[in-house]
Amino acid sequence: MSSSSSIRHLRHFSSTAKSAISISKAKLKLRSEYDPDKALEIYSSVSDHYSSPTISRYAQDLTIRRLAKSRRFADIETLIESHKKDPKIKQEPYLSTLIRSYGRAGMFDQAMRTFEQMDELGTPRSVISFNSLLTACNHSKLFDKVPELFNDLPKKYGVLPDKVTYGILVRSYCEAGTPEKALEIVADMEKNDLEVTAVTYTTIMDAMYKKGQAEEADKLWNTMLDKGCEVDVTAYNVRMMHSHGGEPETVKAMIEEMRNAGLKPDAISYNYLMTSYCKSGMLDEAKKVFDGLEGNGCNPNAATFRSLIYYLCRNEDFDKGYKIFKKSVQVHKIPDFNTLKHLVEGLVKKKKIKEAKGMIRTIKKKFPPNVLVSWGKVEESLGLASASSEAHAATDEDEEAAA
């Protein structure tokens, strides 16, 4: 289906969709579908009987991301604008999802225009849509603009910022590399009797670590504890990510500390442990962490596969790297272009041509069109461009994994 026909179908999906599917089924399909036209087709078949915007927002976000990766910005605008004809547009939470979606695509001008259209569309405006606008600004990486909007728009539209608003403002300062300004905002929150959440503290702590301000970050951690702030897994993961030296024993100790605090380490926690083993040259131990994820109630994510494949390639263990790649295909968590490029090159270097061809054929079905150009160049430079029956036979196993 072409992009224009997909969009045409989408405009009228509420009246023409013949085989509507549930939101949960659509989300499952969208997670593994990288072709933007097919993603649009899946989204267009989602039943429109869901009154809660939070139920469908995730499916919408995934579709927007697929289009944005292929730089299909005109299609994104057509899709989002079509939703403004829906009677639910008069509900602020519904309109707010459109503002956020524009932000996901980095289209802040359109997000701002949608916010300004609320009176015209008959939608009440409150801190809900204002927070969505600030979030869209952050997603569009216009971090310096967030404080400006924070200062100007509440007066103009009679909106009262809440703790979420302040948290978004804090994130903008941290993303801009100025955590010291974020701390000033925290002081303002405390003066105004607004709760400073663990999320806000963690955001600042992360920015401080990134600036090399480990001592200040550690002090902030202690401040969180002193104030009785409920520390969560994310806060521990930030400390783990920036732990001094990143030695396996240090990371293991932090994971144990989390458990003792009644928290369950997640996939990100174990990723840091696995990576610490990899960096220390302990690949067998890293593989044990990977193999033990399911037993720890965790599923590997794309970063899990990326890290393990990267270090296996550095160690020139391309056979194991290829096996891990096939597992990533099975669970639809394929790593990035650069990681897989090293693996393909390594397979060719080790004369594993059959596996390299099979891998590229699988990748071509999973990556968006704009990335496929780069893969074509890799294929050509490695002398793998010529299709053959051997290449088709080599991918039978991968095709089963990708299904």
Image (spheres, helix red, strand yellow):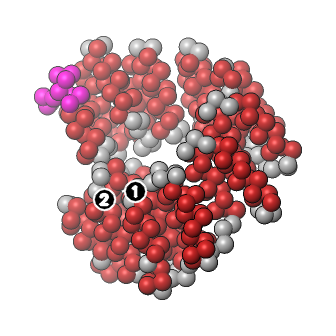
Instruction: Tell me, yes or no, whether the highlighted magenta stretch contains residue 389.
Output: yes
Query: With respect to residue 1, does 306 lie above or below?
Result: above
- Taking 199 as reference, is 221 left or right? right
- Taking 188 as reference, is 284 left or right? left
Instruction: Tell me, yes or no, whether the highlighted magenta stretch contains residue 202.
Output: no
Q: Which residues are magenta?
A: 377-391
Q: Disc 1 marks which amino acid? A: Ala
Q: Is residue 390 visible?
A: no
Q: Is residue 342 visible?
A: yes
Q: Position of residue 123 (x, y in %)?
A: 50, 82
The residue shown at (69%, 40%) is: 205
Q: Which residue is mark 1?
A: 105
- Taking 193 as reference, is 60 left or right? left
SS state under label 1:
loop
Q: Position of residue 394 (x, y in %)?
A: 25, 29
SS state under label 2:
helix
**Image quadrant where one finds the N terminus:** bottom left
Can you tell which mark lies on residue 73?
2
Task: Give 365 or 210, whichever is nearer the viewer.
Answer: 210
Cβ–Cβ under 8 Å for marks 2 and 1: yes
Q: Position of residue 151 (x, y in %)?
A: 60, 64
The residue shown at (80%, 60%) is: 191
Task: Give 136 or 61, whichever is nearer the viewer.
Answer: 136
The residue shown at (36%, 30%) is: 338
Question: Neighbour class for label 1 at 10 Å: few (<14), some, many (≥20)?
Answer: many
Q: Disc 2 marks which amino acid? A: Phe
Task: Give 234 or 202, whichever is nearer the viewer.
Answer: 202
Query: In which quadrant of the rendered view does residue 6 lie?
Result: bottom left
